[in-house]
Image: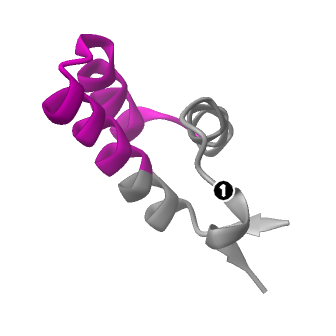
Amino acid sequence: MTIDVDALREAVRNECGAAFFGGGIGPALLDAFDADRASPEELIDMARRWGIDLRKYRID
């Protein structure tokens, strides 16, 4: 499966930001910054940890 990495990167940042600002989860803010520097493989791992459905970012 090929993933739209740019769209996934934005989704991870948004999810982490929402967790930080909405729930006060401090490590989420660090993950949001890490998403900017993550390799595609690291980004996919982060997305899985945050429960993001990778199928939404599949490129056909």
Q: List the single residue furthest toward the bottom.
A: 60
Find residue 42 and report its horizontal and vertical position in percent.
Answer: 61, 32
Give, as a single range, the part of the protein colored magenta: 12-39
Identify the image quadrant of residue 44.
top right
Find residue 1 and report its horizontal and vertical position in percent.
Answer: 85, 66
Q: Which residue is drawn at 64% across and 71% down?
A: 56
> SS class of the residue under badge 1?
loop
Apparent side of residue 24 relative to residue 34 in the rendered image (left or right)? left
Identify the image quadrant of residue 21.
top left
Residue 45 within the magenta-colored segment of the rendering: no
Q: Residue at x 55, y 60 (%)?
A: 5
Q: Residue at x 60, y 41 (%)?
A: 51
Find residue 45 and report its horizontal and vertical position in percent.
Answer: 66, 33
Apparent side of residue 46 relative to residue 32 in the rendered image (left or right)? right
- From the image, tell me which residue sits under label 1: 53
Q: List the single residue furthest toward the left.
A: 21
